[in-house]
Image (cartoon, grey):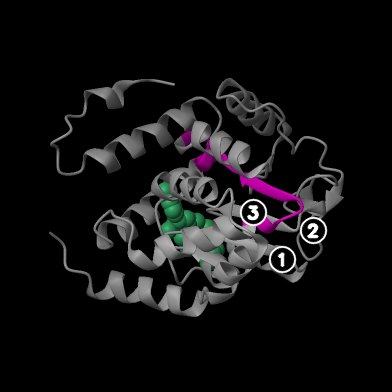
């Protein structure tokens, strides 16, 4: 991918969002990210702007609850789409290692070619095994292409992390009874609404933060993890994020 974003000076007021845009653009050029991914990015940017481009406290609580769920999981899976691959490839691999989770490519506009490219790109960033190509199971309630998942991956998972998932699939996975961790900057999106744990934060900040919490909880006993999970209030977290977005004071 191109490194033109290296030229954006750090003191540029929109430095981070410009770099992020360039990564998505480069992802499209590399055949990893779809064109719709550009639109999704623009939508996310607007919410991030209103959040002051920082992690609010309730999102950090959500990241900790997400980490506790991952720690308690028997079979956690991290779902990766084109935007996630373009923005946080090494960070997803680090989280998968820390949480002992599978990584599965799961695309809205699925083509085998794009799944393969993303899998290769994740391997270039250190992933040992990437699922998503078998596509030998279906999520009920979704049409054929959009419902494809791996039988020994998402289909068998008890906890799934779905960053930037579309609303239909997030709802369908929730109906399968899976614990769903969603990272989405829009607390009102159907994905965030369907989540067991909505992390209303930029995926760029949220993934490393969840990893930090997973590491921090490495020695925590089951009772502590269960307590973190049970004390997390998803409705309160969504409401707090919505309040921050509507009322937030920008620096
Ligand atoms: P839904 O289908 O769940 O109701 P939507 O139609 O608003 O939501 P899409 O346009 O399908 O959502 O996908 C984009 C979503 O991803 C938006 O909610 C946007 O805020 C979010 N998003 C985009 N980029 C990021 C990012 N870097 N970090 C976190 N969230 C992001
Ligand atoms: Mg949508």
Name which of mark 2 and mark 1 comes first in the sequence.
2
**Mark 1 sits on what residue?**
172
- Asked if the residue at tag 1 contacts the one at tag 2, i.e. Cβ–Cβ closer than 8 Å, the answer is yes
The span from disc 2 to disc 1 (Cα, nearest Å) is 7 Å
Give the secondary structure at mark 1: helix
Name which of mark 3 and mark 2 comes first in the sequence.
3
Write down the quadrant of residue 227 in the picture: bottom right
Residue 61 coordinates in the image, percent (x, y):
44, 65
The reply to whether the magenta stretch includes residue 75 is yes
Q: How many residues crowd around disc 1 within 10 Å: few (fewer than 14), some, or many (20 or more)? A: some
Residue 155 coordinates in the image, percent (x, y):
81, 53
The reply to whether the magenta stretch includes residue 133 is no
Residue drawn 31% across and 76% down? 243
Write down the quadrant of residue 52 in the picture: bottom left
Tell me if I can see residue 168 in this picture: no
Residue 56 coordinates in the image, percent (x, y):
33, 63
On the rendered image, what quadrant is the C terminus found in?
bottom left
Name which of mark 3 and mark 1 comes first in the sequence.
3
**Mark 2 sits on what residue?**
139
The span from disc 3 to disc 1 (Cα, nearest Å) is 23 Å
Count of numbered tags: 3
Q: How many residues crowd around disc 3 within 10 Å: few (fewer than 14), some, or many (20 or more)? A: many
Residue 14 coordinates in the image, percent (x, y):
20, 43
Magenta segment boundaries in residue numbering: 70-86
Give the secondary structure at mark 3: helix
Is 171 rendered above or below residue 166?
below
**Mark 3 sits on what residue?**
71
Give the secondary structure at mark 2: loop
Q: How many residues crowd around disc 2 within 10 Å: few (fewer than 14), some, or many (20 or more)? A: some
Disc 1 CB within 8 Å of nearest ligand 1 atom: no
Residue drawn 37% across and 75% down? 240
């Amino acid at each position: 991918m191109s490194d033109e974003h290296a030229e954006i000076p750090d003191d540029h007021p929109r430095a981070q969002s410009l770099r992020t845009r360039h990564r998505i653009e480069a992802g499209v050029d590399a055949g990893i990210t779809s064109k719709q991914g550009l639109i999704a990015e623009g939508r996310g940017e607007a919410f991030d702007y209103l959040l002051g481009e920082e992690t609010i406290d309730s999102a950090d609580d959500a990241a900790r609850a997400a980490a506790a769920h991952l720690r308690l999981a028997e079979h956690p899976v991290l779902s990766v789409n084109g935007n996630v691959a373009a923005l946080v490839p090494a960070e997803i691999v680090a989280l998968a290692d820390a949480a002992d989770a599978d990584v599965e490519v799961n695309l809205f506009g699925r083509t085998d070619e794009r799944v393969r490219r993303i899998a290769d790109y994740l391997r270039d960033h250190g992933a040992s095994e990437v699922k998503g190509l078998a596509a030998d199971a279906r999520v009920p309630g979704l049409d054929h292409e959009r419902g494809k998942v791996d039988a020994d991956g998402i289909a068998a998972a008890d906890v799934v992390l779905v960053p930037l998932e579309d609303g239909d699939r997030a709802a369908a996975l929730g109906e399968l009874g899976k614990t769903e961790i969603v990272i989405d900057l829009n607390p009102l999106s159907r994905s965030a609404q369907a989540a067991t744990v909505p992390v209303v934060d930029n995926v760029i900040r949220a993934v490393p933060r969840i990893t930090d919490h997973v590491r921090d909880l490495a020695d925590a006993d089951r009772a502590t993890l269960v307590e973190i999970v049970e004390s997390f209030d998803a409705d309160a977290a969504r409401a707090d994020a919505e309040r921050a977005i509507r009322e937030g004071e920008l620096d």
